[in-house]
Image: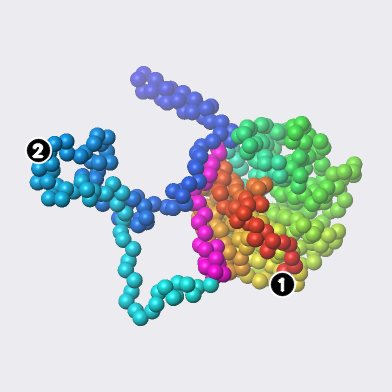
Amino acid sequence: RVVSRFVALTVRLVTLGMQSRSVLGELSHAELTSESTFDHAANGSQGCRFIPNRSTVGEVSKMMLEQQEDLAPANQYESVLAGHLLGRNGELDKAKVLSFKSKPPPPEASGMDTARVLYSVSAGAAAAKAKATRLIPSQPLKVLDAPDISDNFYSHVVDWSAQDVVSVALGSTVYMWRASDGRTDELCTVDGDRNAVTSIKWTQEGGHLAVGTEDATVQLYDAAQQRQLRCMRGHGDRVGVVGWCGPILASGSRTGELHLHDVRIREHLVKKLMAHDGEVCGLDWSEAGALATGGNDNVVHVWEKEADVPRWSFREHKAAVKAIAWCPWNRGLLATGGGTADRQIKLWNATNGVCIATTDSGSQVSALVWNPHDKELVSGHGYVNNELNVWRYPSFQKLATLTGHKGRVLGLALAPDDSTVLSAGADEALRFWKMFEPRGSKQNGNAEAAMRPKTIR
């Protein structure tokens, strides 16, 4: 009887814990101070020499730090006693509350004039070195709970609108989280016992959301009024990816078909393309209206505006290509990433069809996002490392590796001010990473001018 009552109490506590879990509730929040940009080892023998280390502080110094009273001798007797205990001159005068790990190493003996070398370094070289070694916080700014998020590599379940609203698909329901005040609203729930939301994408102005479903429909919602505007049919299987180019909505399905919808007219389906031999699992529009698609057949197609056949077909990947991103500041530059059997990130010149750079990322590539103001690329990864990487273009120098997800990174989204990258993980968590300077900031002033869209060379 005692055992049965204990089991019943345990079940009750677990049930209460599950009921108290809130959708998109905040799990953690970090202030992005200088402390969060360093990884401190737990062992006191490791660390930065500029960080105070309590283990090297003397006992008298610890007493000064921990006690509030005045430690100066009150009379002649105490002065004599302090002199015998702490030394003739008194350790109190020399005690240090802040002690650093170690002193900087002395310069190596040489005949070189160090001052002359120091001032002979050009300002351009110093600036380039500073940019290459900039600090990216290793901890997320915020973490939100995302219960029931689908652990499906082929789905696209998160996006961030121009109106600063994050949409996330959790099972059969789409939620909206407003970054300005942290409010969460339910936008819609798709009908059907076995139905689920498999893809979402905001329009460029951020007022409407396209939703692809497991039962092969594409739905359009008004976010402000939180109501469905229309439901478009035509696909034969789940719609795993959708993307906007003005009023034209592209949708890709498991059958390999690519549909182009003009949402302004009643007969919305304006073009049907048999794009891939496998599921269409990635697509992205360029600012010029070119469409790049990736499929489970390991192929990347590049379609010119209103074309019926692809201009280029890239077949160098050895696994499904979900991660696809056009560069915002270099027309014709396309980044693609392959799945677990490939792990490659490739950069393509879509003007002449040449692969200009490639790197082995070491993990399944699930998403790619460009820095709009600098020559950097962010990649999200699944098996085996479940991490984010920041790369320098075009050298693929790794600037940072961000860890924390316990499951694969399902997707990435960029904030409307271009400063924060959101990662959605199969561990049912949304992590917000402070990566770049906000658009229009003083630091980005010169970079924005240099990064104006241009033709790849």
Residue 262: numbered disc: none
**Mark 2 or mark 1, which is nearer to you?**
2
Q: Quadrant of residue 231?
A: top right
310 in relation to 5, above or below = below
Residue 256 horizontal side relative to residue 272, left or right: left
Give the mark nearer the N terminus: 2 vs 1.
2
Residue 77: numbered disc: 2
Residue 194, image x, y percentages: 68, 36
| Residue sitting farthest toward the right | 266
Q: Amino acid at mark 1?
A: Arg
**In the rendered view of the protein, which quadrant contains the C terminus?**
bottom right
Residue at numbered disc 1: 457
Q: Can the viewer see residue 391 in this picture?
A: yes
**In the rendered view of the protein, which quadrant contains the N terminus?**
top left
Element class at badge 1: loop
Q: Amino acid at mark 2?
A: Tyr
The residue located at (81%, 49%) in the rendering is: 246
Q: Quadrant of residue 265?
A: top right
Q: CA distance from mark 2 to mark 1?
A: 83 Å
Residue 36, image x, y percentages: 46, 48
- Dot 2, how many residues are within 10 Å of its Cα: few (below 14), some (14-19), or many (20+)? few
The residue located at (81%, 36%) in the rendering is: 229
Q: Nearest the camera: 302 or 42? A: 42
Residue 203 horizontal side relative to residue 408, left or right: right
Q: Nearest the camera: 54 or 334? A: 54
Residue 17, image x, y percentages: 49, 28
Q: Can the viewer see residue 383 in this picture?
A: no
The residue located at (13%, 41%) in the rendering is: 79
Residue range corresponding to the magenta coloring: 123-145
393 in relation to 252, above or below = below
37 in relation to 307, above or below = above
